[in-house]
Every structure is written in C-alpha cells, then in structure tokens.
Amino acid sequence: MAGVREAKKRRTRQAILQAAVQLFGDKGYERTSINELARAAGVGKGTIYSYFQTKSEIFLAFCEDELEQVYAEVAQKTGPDATLTEQLMAFFMGQFRYVTRHKDFGRLLLREMIFPKELTVERSKDLDNSYIDYLSAMCNKAQERGELRRDVDLLFVCGHFYALYLITVSAWYMGRLQTEDDVDGALQLLLQQSLEGLLPAGRK
Amino acid sequence: MAGVREAKKRRTRQAILQAAVQLFGDKGYERTSINELARAAGVGKGTIYSYFQTKSEIFLAFCEDELEQVYAEVAQKTGPDATLTEQLMAFFMGQFRYVTRHKDFGRLLLREMIFPKELTVERSKDLDNSYIDYLSAMCNKAQERGELRRDVDLLFVCGHFYALYLITVSAWYMGRLQTEDDVDGALQLLLQQSLEGLLPAGRK
DNA sequence: AAAAAAAGCCGACCGTGGTCGACTTTGTGT
DNA sequence: ACACAAAGTCGACCACGGTCGGCTTTTTTT
C-alpha cells in the first residue's frame, strides 16, 4: 500500500499550483497573499511552505508554464527561412510583449532570473537553460547557413544577444524607451552593432 | 525666521542616511529593520517614511555614495594611455569586486537599477545616468583615438558594453561563473566579440 | 492487530515593511 | 502678542511572508 502518500502529495502540489495560476493570473502576484493561496488550494499555510521554500519559488514554478507558451507562440510565427536577426527579433519581442502585458509580473520574473537568490537559483537556472537551448539552436543553424562566425563559442554568442535584449527591456522599465516600436528599434540597432562590430572599418 | 524648518529637515535627513550607512554597512540591508534604523537615527518610524517612500529608496540613496567611491577608485587605477578594453575592464571589474564583497547587497542594487519599480524609478535613473556619463566619456575619447566607430550612437555603445557586463554578473549570480578570473575572462571575451562583430569575415 | 516510527499537515505566532490619524512645532496674518 | 494654518513628527496598528511545535495520517515493525 505504498503510494497513497505519493499520490496525495502530487495532487496537493497540483492544487497549489492550480490555485496560483488562478490567483496570480487574476489579481497579480503581489496582491495574492499566501493565506488566500492556501485557502484557494484547500490546504493550510504551513503546507504550502513544505512544498515551496518561498513565495517567489511558487511564482517561478508558475512561470515555467507561461514561458513554454511564449516559446511556442514565437516558433509558430517565424518562417523557417527567416534570417538570424529576424528570428532573434521575433523571439525577443515575443517575450517583451508578454512582459509589457504584465509589467509587475515581468519585473519580478526578470529579477529572479537574472539576479537570483541562493534559495531560488536552481529554479532560475532551469528556466535559463531552456532559454539558452532555444537560442543555441537558433544560432547553430545560423552558423551553418553562414550568417554567424564559426570560431565563437555558441554560449557566448547567445549570452551576447540575450544581454542586448535585457538592456533593452531595462531601458523600457526605466522609461527611456516608451513604446513597443522604440524597443523594437533599439534592439534591432544593438543586434546590428553586435554583428558588425564596433571597431572602425579599417581596424578589423 | 524662515529657514529653521528647512535646516531641521536637512539635518533629520542626514541623520537617517547616516544611520543607514552605519547599519547597512554593518549588519546588511535585509537584516536592518526600519525600527532599528529609526531608533538609530533618533526619529520615529513614521518620520522615515515622510523622507523616503520605501526602504529600498533609502538603500538607493545610500548607494549613490558608495558608487561614487567605486568610480573614484577605478579612475585612479587606469592610466590615461590605457586602451578602451582595458578601461572598460577596469571599470566593470571594479564594480564587480564591490558586488562580490557584498553579494546580497549587490543583488538588491542591481535589481533596483536594472528593473526598477515605478516608485524608485527616478532614483534608479539618477544612478544610471551617472553610470552612462562615465562610460560615455570613456567611449567618446576612444572614438577620438580611433578605437571605436564614429558612426554609432554613443548611448547605444555604452548600453552595449553595459549589457555585456550585466550578463556576466548575472552568470556569476547564477553560479555559471565562479571565480573572479572566470568573470574577467568571460567579460573580456564578450567585449572582444562586440568590437570585432559576430558576422563571418567575408560578410562585413 | 497493535504499537512504534515516519511523513505530512496545520494554524497560532513572530517580526517585518508600511499606513494612519492624533499630536507638536513652525510660520503667518492681524 | 495672539490665533490659526501648515508642515512635520510619532508610534500604535495592519496585513504580510515565513516559522514552529503539536497533531493526524500513513507506513513499517513486532
């Protein structure tokens, strides 16, 4: 009769996540208290903390699903014959549109993903890895098509592009870039810089 | 007799910041409660909130000083005939060393500066501006020395470099880069990429 | 089948950041 | 010099995230 426990645990965990999706999506992360969440999930407050270490960890678990969705949406939108820049722009702007729709939400996710605390670093890494995988595949194909140098480490190239995306989003959060078009333009320009290089023509 | 008020206000404000420097520096930001801070500053809790909107705003005000110090330290270390890359590395690694010394501290600062909340966005912008000014000056001189293309917007170049620094720090927070040397190497590589460009040789 | 151990669950409890309205001090009009 | 308004101060109070020790349920041992 070993397994009753396991099954129950899975169900409880699901119930919590389910309630989280409902409440976070509905009234936002900050405005959802653990007590509410517990009540909605039909468990005690303490129970929640035996499944997740902190509130933000629940948040990250919740985000994993959301991000998958964004990936799917983007993959569907870009044709297979798009240039690397086009693909990157589609990928990043897809993310960005999501962030703009849920500003507080996006900020929290970015904060956790880019500058994680020790407690949540593992979760952040998971999310980050799926991110990198996606970008790597993209860049790898671009290399094969001859759109990208072959003598550079893929990881660093992905990091490079990702960095440019981040600084752009940051500029938006700071109010330096206001509209989606601003962001689009800035990112495009930065990507172009990264491809062409910043050295004067003669010194390459 | 108009001015007694003003003077008192300035003194109170100073007292709060003074206490903040003391306590934050001593036992850290998270471990310092507003109550303690109030007591140390010799004012009531409510008073603090009439000078600052939130705890993290106090933090940012406190950081402005700290950052100035880092700037000064860096400026002093790089000779005037250093290459752009050398200067950038000195600047960024100076920052980074500060961050490593105060890990939680640095994370908070970065979070607030890169993805600010509406409430603190103004303060973040101030910090960011001083940052950009510094980098701009550096890049401007590099342009004049012919180390940098002239047909690019300085702001975007600074943003580009800054982005690469951020992603590197992020990688450190994620545990992907462990030692200071790792960080140094990664950043150097990324900067080099940005200068040379990522396009294959033939396609520039 | 009974007893002991292990695992899981719970909500009263703690200290926190932040709010609020009552109170005090400073400035101003007469 | 006085009264009144405005600005500034305060700490009791609130809801929150997170902890903890006692309680219940499942599993293992005898």
Image: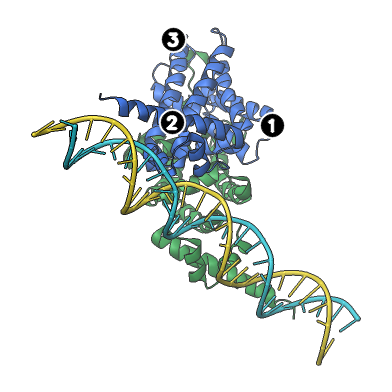
Chain colours: A green, B blue, C yellow, D cyan
Both labels 3 and 2 in a single chain: no
Give whichever of A138, A48 is nearer the camera.
A48
Give whichever of C24, B119 is nearer the camera.
C24
Q: Chain of mark 3?
A: B
Callout 3 secondary element: helix
Residue B58 visible: yes
Callout 2 secondary element: helix
Residue that label 3 marks: B144
Quadrant position of the N terminus of chain A in the picture = bottom right
D29 above or below A128?
Answer: below
Give whichever of A146, A35 is nearer the camera.
A35
- Asked if the residue at tag 1 contacts the one at tag 3, i.e. Cβ–Cβ closer than 8 Å, the answer is no
Measure the alpha-carbon separation of dots 3 and 1.
35 Å
Q: Quadrant of residue B88?
A: top right
Q: Chain of mark 2?
A: A
Q: Position of residue B40 (x, y in %)?
A: 52, 36
Residue B179, numbered label = 1
Residue B27, numbered label = none
Residue at 55% x, 31% y: name it: B22
Q: Quadrant of residue D30?
A: bottom right
Is B175 placed left or right of B22 in the picture? right
Residue at 63% x, 45% y: name it: A118
Q: Position of residue B120 (x, y in %)?
A: 40, 38
Residue that label 2 marks: A190
Is A92 placed left or right of A133 in the picture? left
Hey, what amino acid is under mark 2? Leu
Q: Quadrant of residue B45?
A: top left
